[in-house]
Amino acid sequence: MKIPNGHQIIEEFEKWSPKYLAMEGDPIGLHVGTLNKKIDRVLVTLDVNEEVVDEAIAKGAGLIIAHHPPIFRPLKNLQTDFPQGRLMGKLIKSDIAVYAAHTNLDVAAGGVNDLLATALGLQNTKVLVPTYEAELVKIAVFVPETHEETVREALAKAGAGAIGDYESCSYTLSGTGRFRPTNDADPYIGEAGKMEVTAESKVEVVVRKNEKDRVIKAMISAHPYEEVAYDVFTLENKEIAMGLGRVGTLETPMTLAEFAEWTKQQLGVPALRVVGAPDTVIKKVAVLGGDGNKYIQQAKRSGADVYVTGDLYFHVAQDAQDIGLNVVDPGHHVEKVIIQGVVDHMSKQQPTWQCEFLPSETDTEPFRFM
Ligand SMILES: [Zn+2]
């Protein structure tokens, strides 16, 4: 067991929720402190407030992973007589780093929106608002048959071969490799000046262009040869679009009134707001965590019978009514599903790490329902 440093933890996290999935201008990433240190405890939270920082101190966490960026608008000062300055001061004094993953974690597979869709029991889910379409490359590497499996595993572990709902996809062909090591070479097989003929496999994988460098690095370090022969091809195929929100169907249709009760129970909220006639039958559901005011048209066009989103404005609710879109607003805080989501995901990535991922027990919901 080895205590990872902050960079290793974030590198692992970003394989799942890469920065390039974030909306433009979203202030994600490291907000406070440094990743240049060993971290054996990470506190995962939706928001960073003073109580959360106290919790991190009490639990000995060196890093907080938060969904909502604590520095959303630029700070004008760091006066510790005021709440935000006091919070920042406490973090720095206690050497606690804060890393934020916001819209990239909304978009990521298994992120906020997928977790909300799962909690609501939605099936056959699709993306509601596409925001990102990955450019793809194909990497073909030539490897001696003895090391085919090792290299294939390294490629998959680095994220290569993820196609839609499938992972670790690859294609392998057998062939013959020929090479003559020169006097300066230190060959794994063969000897200087002598032509070598060896059984090799060609392993092909599809990789997101943004992840190509990381995958090539992992492939080369798993490959036995001194000079690795590989090709990188640009593809015209695009990956299935990723994005915000999900649309899916309920296993059993229910009325809007029943669906509202179901949502309360599944998302753990004591109350919610509903737009629409209570007896409407609901089968198809669109869900978008956080503030989804901007996307009522997309929700309508998706054919959803109801749109579940938070922070609904009065006039947007009226617009929804006008276009015949039912809405259930369980609030913004239902995004708390991501806390356990991050803990579960990160805890199983590196079984040899001595690092605990702890869900924050602080309730950061500012509203009380009465
Ligand atoms: Zn949010």
Image (cartoon, rainbow, N blue to C red):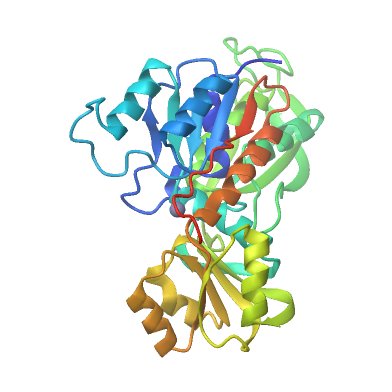
Residue for point 44% across, 43% down: 19
Quadrant containing the N terminus in the rendered view: top right
Residue for point 62% across, 52% down: 110
219 relative to 160, above or below: above
101 relative to 301, above or below: above
- Where residue 215 sits in the image (x, y, percent)? 57, 37
Out of 63 and 270, give the one closest to the viewer: 270
Residue 332 seen in this snapshot: yes
- Where residue 353 sits in the image (x, y, percent)? 67, 22
Q: Is residue 133 left or right of residue 77?
A: right
In this view, the residue farthest toward the front is 370
Disc tally is: 0
Out of 235 and 76, give the one closest to the viewer: 76
Rendered image quadrant of residue 255: bottom right
In this view, the residue farthest toward the left is 76
- Where residue 144 sits in the image (x, y, percent)? 75, 30
Residue 228 seen in this snapshot: no
- Where residue 211 sits in the image (x, y, percent)? 52, 42
Out of 310 and 160, give the one closest to the viewer: 310
Q: Is residue 75 left or right of residue 38?
A: left
Residue for point 19% across, 30% down: 77
Residue for point 26% across, 25% down: 80
316 relative to 169, above or below: below
